[in-house]
């Protein structure tokens, strides 16, 4: 597996551990719908958190969250609309980003709630 794929998988597990530690219940990992993949779907109370995990080994080229583009957001919106409808959920949906910079000696995790508001 390529190094960036391993880093991505490690980042997703770090994000899941972070969410669980902070009171979230993990409902889905790598949920797929058409061309979309949602990294993590978690719930805390009546909030359904749709979480995009972005992991980088350095912030040299920008913060991890800066790599979520408009196309990805549209795909996530479509996927979660389908998920909520199929599961017949009565929840408030929130789109979050967990940005991780994972270096050999240090890992920085930042949870950005409602991260897509400025895109919509």
Image (tube, rainbow, N blue to C red):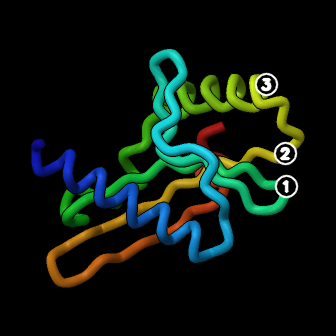
Could you classify mark 1 by the number of other residues whose Cα lies within 10 Å: few (under 14), some (14-19), or many (20 or more)? few
Q: Label 2: few (<14), some or many (≥20) within 10 Å?
A: some
* Residue 65 drawn at (x, y percent): 42, 54
Residue identifier under label 1: 46
Q: Nearer the viewer, residue 3 or 68?
A: 3
Quarter of the C terminus within the rendering: top right
Left or right position of 99 against 29: left
Residue 64 appears in the rendering? no
Percent x, y for residue 45? 82, 61
Q: Earlier in the sequence, mark 2 or mark 3?
A: 3
Which numbered disc flags the more N-terminal residue, 1 or 3? 1
Q: Is residue 66 above or below residue 25?
A: above
What is the crowding at mark 3: few (fewer than 14 residues within 10 Å), some, or many (at least 20)? Answer: few
Q: Which mark is residue 91?
A: 2
The residue tagged with tag 3: helix, strand or loop? helix
Give the distance between the C-alpha atoms of the residues marked 1 and 3, in whole angstroms: 16 Å
> How many numbered discs?
3
Asked whether the residues under the numbered discs 2 and 1 touch, taking CB atoms below 8 Å apart as contact, a structural biologist would say yes
Residue 28, compared with residue 35, is above or below; it is below
Mark seen at residue 85: 3
Q: Position of residue 11 (x, y in %)?
A: 34, 59
- Dividing the picture into quarters, in which one does residue 57 lie? bottom left
Q: Give the residue at x 25% y 65%.
A: 59
Question: Which element type, helix, strand or loop, lies under badge 1?
Answer: loop
Alpha-carbon distance for marks 2 and 1? Answer: 5 Å
């Amino acid at each position: 597996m390529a190094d960036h794929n391993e880093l991505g998988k490690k980042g997703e597990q770090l994000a899941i551990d972070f969410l669980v530690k902070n009171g979230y219940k993990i409902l889905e990992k790598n949920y797929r719908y058409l061309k979309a993949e949602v990294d993590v779907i978690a719930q805390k109370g009546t909030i359904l958190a749709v979480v995009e995990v972005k992991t980088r080994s350095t912030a040299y080229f920008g913060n991890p969250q800066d790599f979520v583009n408009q196309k990805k957001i549209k795909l996530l919106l479509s996927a979660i609309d389908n998920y909520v409808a199929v599961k017949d959920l009565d929840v408030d949906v929130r789109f979050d980003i967990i940005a991780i910079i994972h270096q050999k000696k240090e890992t920085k995790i930042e949870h950005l709630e409602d991260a897509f508001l400025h895109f919509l």
